Image (spheres, rainbow, N blue to C red):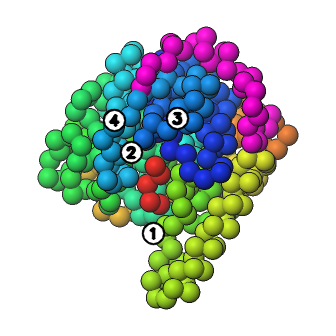
């Protein structure tokens, strides 16, 4: 059984549409049985009601919230992953609310490469020079996670060696704790990298190994570390306003595209004939402090069908469309979801 764990932080008028779309993509493309676990920072009532209508197994978030967004995100993921494994899941995959699979049978693809020695597959945002697994997509085996001890963060509960704590390119971000645990255990992991043929933006609308989509800034205002290189906003208020307006315009465009023309937009980002890429096996002890994107010519394709096929394929124009803005009626597959999941119990994007 696969447990999918998501922290649902709704931001702006499109937030609930993203929540609906992310769940629809999981329903549409996941091959095996799964349970969807979720929580909402601050336990917002409308968000929890929307999650419940989708059959999400709701975990109540602690009343006391960390001041740091990344620390809160990591601690909530820790709680969700603890619960999923304690309830019998053999594997867990984490997503952000604005990230989801775009590959049929994505779960079987990544489960097939996870082993005792390489128990994790995860996005690494090398386009941002990061070197740690990102929770926008991280899949792991049950044997890797130690309930009550493992953590996505470095400061929550994990006891890592000084070498591991210094390894991450951004130690305060969610996912650094996974890198540290892999390092200390002498284990490797499978790395997914950005694979866009067309880049709408340096951060937003990202594809990873042509299997995972990430909108970027879906739960917050669109400000990025990459702004400093692209716009130099610190040099004057005018440049800051320009950077903000450019990012807001791109955010509005990408949000409209994924909600109204999802498959066509993803196919354009991926490029003609795109296939899923094999993840890169990675030794944490050999990682540099900062990384760069691996050239496309050095990547290997996975042996799956072409886009539009019946197995492991990128959703292509003409395939079943992803839903746009949600209707007020019950989602068509909700009855199926509830039949294969237990009754729900009570239960942010990082910068860049």
Q: CA distance from mark 1 to mark 3?
A: 32 Å
Pointer 1 or 3: first along the chain: 3
How many residues crowd around disc 2 within 10 Å: few (fewer than 14), some, or many (20 or more)?
many
Q: Is residue 175 visible?
A: no
Element assignment for label 3: helix
Pointer 2 or 4: first along the chain: 4
Q: Where does the image place residue 52, in percent across and percent down from the top left? A: 57, 25
Q: Where does the image place residue 345, in percent across and percent down from the top left? A: 44, 18
Q: Which residue is mark 4?
A: 62
Q: CA distance from mark 2 to mark 1?
A: 19 Å
Pointer 2 or 3: first along the chain: 3
Q: Which mark is residue 73?
A: 2
Element assignment for label 2: helix
Q: Which residue is mark 1?
A: 225
Magenta span: 320-347
Residue at position x 14%, y 52% from top?
A: 162
Element assignment for label 1: loop
Query: Is the C-beta separation of discs 1 and 3 under 8 Å?
Result: no
Q: Nearer the viewer, mark 2 or mark 4?
A: 4
Pointer 4 or 3: first along the chain: 3
Q: Is residue 62 visible?
A: yes
How many residues crowd around disc 1 within 10 Å: few (fewer than 14), some, or many (20 or more)?
few
Q: Where does the image place residue 257, in percent across and percent down from the top left? A: 74, 53
């Amino acid at each position: 059984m696969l447990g999918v764990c998501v922290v649902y932080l709704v931001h702006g008028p499109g937030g609930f549409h993203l929540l609906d779309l992310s769940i629809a993509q999981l329903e549409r493309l996941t091959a095996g049985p799964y349970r969807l676990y979720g929580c909402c920072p601050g336990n917002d009532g409308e968000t929890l009601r929307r999650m419940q209508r989708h059959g999400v197994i709701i975990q109540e978030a602690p009343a006391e919230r960390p001041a740091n967004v990344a620390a809160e995100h990591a601690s909530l993921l820790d709680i969700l992953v603890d619960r999923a494994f304690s309830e019998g899941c053999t594997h867990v995959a984490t997503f952000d609310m604005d990230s989801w699979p775009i590959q049929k049978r994505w779960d079987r693809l990544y489960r097939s490469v996870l082993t005792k020695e390489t128990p994790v597959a995860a996005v690494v945002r090398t386009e941002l020079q990061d070197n740690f697994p990102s929770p926008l997509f991280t899949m792991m085996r049950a044997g890797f996670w130690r309930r009550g001890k493992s953590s996505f963060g470095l400061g929550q509960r994990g006891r890592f060696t000084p070498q591991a704590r210094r390894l991450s390119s951004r130690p305060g971000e969610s996912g650094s704790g996974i890198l540290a645990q892999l390092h200390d255990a002498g284990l490797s992991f499978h790395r997914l990298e950005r694979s866009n043929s067309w880049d709408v933006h340096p951060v937003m609308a990202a594809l990873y190994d042509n299997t995972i989509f990430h909108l970027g800034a879906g739960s917050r205002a669109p400000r990025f570390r990459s702004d400093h290189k692209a716009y130099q906003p610190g040099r004057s208020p005018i440049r800051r306003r320009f950077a903000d307006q450019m990012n807001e315009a791109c955010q509005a465009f990408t949000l409209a595209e994924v909600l109204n023309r999802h498959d066509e937009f993803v196919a354009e980002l991926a490029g003609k004939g795109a296939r899923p890429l094999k993840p890169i096996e990675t030794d944490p002890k050999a990682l540099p402090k900062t990384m760069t994107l691996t050239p496309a010519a050095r990547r290997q394709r996975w042996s799956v069908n072409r886009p539009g096929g019946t197995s492991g394929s990128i959703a292509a124009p003409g395939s079943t469309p992803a839903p746009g803005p949600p209707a007020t009626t019950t989602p068509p597959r909700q009855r199926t979801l509830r039949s294969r999941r237990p009754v729900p119990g009570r239960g942010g994007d990082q910068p860049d």
